[in-house]
Amino acid sequence: MKTLIVLLMTAVVAFSAHADEKSIQHLKVADVTSVEDARKIFIEKTSEIRSKRDLDAAELQDIHVITYTLEKSVEFFTLNLIGDKKKLAEDIAVVVEDIHINSERNRKEETQKHLNQYFVLADKFIKSF
């Protein structure tokens, strides 16, 4: 009986510690099918994310939603580019996933850290268009 009580208390503590990290229902986004669309989406979504300054809960939610479409754009690049551009797209994909997860879990500082990395990579990538 003591073991059961300890397990239940541990579960309650663990759940309450992560209460602010609720997952958002995943969205389905259409695949990107052309270079033109991938570029347009990448530039637009990067601009949208860049406009988020406060990184409060509402902005983190917005960033999380934006990353769904951004991920599709980056995925297109990783599958259709070669050489250095492909490697850069793959690096961006990793950082976008980090932004996605941390914004979903309402982690302001971690999201900001990954956004800083993203903007450096994204600026370099956009210059190569």
Image (cartoon, rainbow, N blue to C red):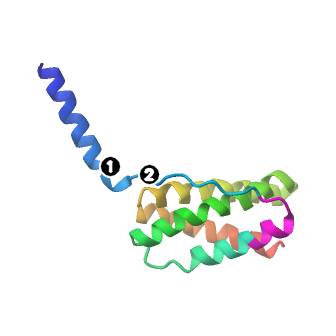
Quarter in which the N terminus is drawn:
top left
Indicate which disc residue 18 carries: 1
Q: Going by the image, does 96 lie left or right of 52?
A: right
Q: Amino acid at mark 2?
A: Ser
Question: Residue at (64%, 78%) from the top-left corner?
Answer: 47
- Whether the residues at callouts 1 and 2 have beta carbons within 8 Å, the answer is no
Mark 2: which secondary structure? loop
Quadrant of the image occupied by residue 81: bottom right
Q: Which residue is mark 2?
A: 23
111 vs 63, nearest the viewer: 63
Quadrant of the image occupied by residue 27: bottom right
Q: Going by the image, does 24 lie left or right of 2?
A: right
Magenta stretch: residue 114 in it? Answer: no
Q: Main secondary structure of the magenta part?
A: helix
96 vs 88, nearest the viewer: 96
Tell me which label, 1 or 2, sits earlier in the chain.
1
Question: Residue at (74%, 54%) from the top-left corner?
Answer: 75
| Region of the chain picked out in magenta, as a range | 32-40
Q: Position of residue 87 (x, y in %)?
A: 78, 55
Q: Amino acid at mark 1?
A: His
Q: Position of residue 25 (x, y in %)?
A: 49, 52
Rendered view: 66 above or below 23: below
